[in-house]
Amino acid sequence: MRSMTGFGVGEAPLAFALPLSGPTRDEGSGAYGKLTLEIRSVNHRYLDVRVKAPSQLPDLVSAVEAIARERLTRGRFDVSVRIEGAAPFAVTIHAARARSVFAALVALRDELAPDAEVPLSLLGSVPDLFVPSIEQQGEAVRVALIAAFDAALRSLDAMRLREGLALGDDIVRRLATVRKLAQQVGERSPTVVEVYKKKLKERAERLRMVSEIEVDAGRLEQELALFADRVDVCEELTRLESHTAHFESLVVSEGAVGRRLDFLLQEMAREANTIGAKSQDVEIAHAVVDLKAEIERMREQVQNIE
């Protein structure tokens, strides 16, 4: 079982050097530079990938998104990529923009200082005029990107597993509380009928003493049977235990179980509401309030489980 929240980082050289490996970080120094990739994950109903990459490498965003959607499932993932060092990428020049900028500089020169020279070196300060092209020299980047992504995923999975285990332990403790409260309701339910039976007999006796009216014993038994049927929660408790047992088996299983756990908790909450609606006893009512509160806390925890 994994948590939906986590953080992972991976690094890879932008050359053919072999990377060094570590428990949560893979790094190596290449002849040209290094690519670092970070992944942050949070809970989300669907898959939402957001990539932040160097503006000089716009093609890198689509490449990262493609890899992310192949390897990730539900959740929001913020992926950031940065490149350190001087990688020897082929350079694409925006010729039309260069001509436009240079023409503007020449026009300004003609207006302000006709005899001055306009060196081409001025174009070097124009933002995004010279753009490294991942399409022309992208193999080194793609190799580094996949290696860094693998390392970041390993790091992310390790963190999500640790947090998932902690969440699982907390949920198991709360599940034990749910079972204990359900047991209290089950043990108290027969007493409710006995208490009502005693009250019926006391009311019949008072009526006989005040009005000298004898209450038919069969009528009392019929009223008692109707009451017992109204407050009977055996079916609800049986279904609640079935949901609880299924829930417990999923908690210790592998794979993505978050949605199934959430569905089971909805069913458990429905049974608790029905028990509360049938309740004619203060102790059962208090137990149901605690039961519903515990189920709601579990639902909050389950939202962070994959």
Image (tube, grey):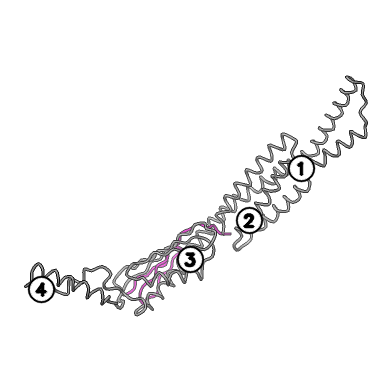
How far apart in space, not on screen, are marks 4 and 3 (Cα)? 54 Å
Residue marked by disc 2: 261
The amino acid type of the residue labelled 3 equals Leu
Q: Quick one: quadrant of the N terminus?
A: bottom right
Mark 2 crowd level (few <14, some 14–19, many ≥20, 10 Å Cα):
many
Q: Is residue 292 above or below residue 37?
A: above
The amino acid type of the residue labelled 4 equals Glu
Residue marked by disc 1: 186
Q: Are marks 3 and 2 in contact (CB under 8 Å)?
A: no
Is 12 magenta? The answer is: yes
Which badge, 4 or 3, is on the more N-terminal residue?
Answer: 4
Q: Which residues are magenta?
A: 1-30
Q: In the picture provided, is 166 more to the left or to the right than 224?
A: left
Q: Main secondary structure of the magenta part?
A: loop
Numbered disc in front, either 4 or 2? 4
Secondary structure category for the residue under label 4: loop
Which badge, 3 or 2, is on the more N-terminal residue?
Answer: 3
| Residue shown at the point (79%, 36%) measured from the top left | 192
Q: Position of residue 66 (x, y in %)?
A: 46, 71
Which badge, 4 or 2, is on the more N-terminal residue?
Answer: 4
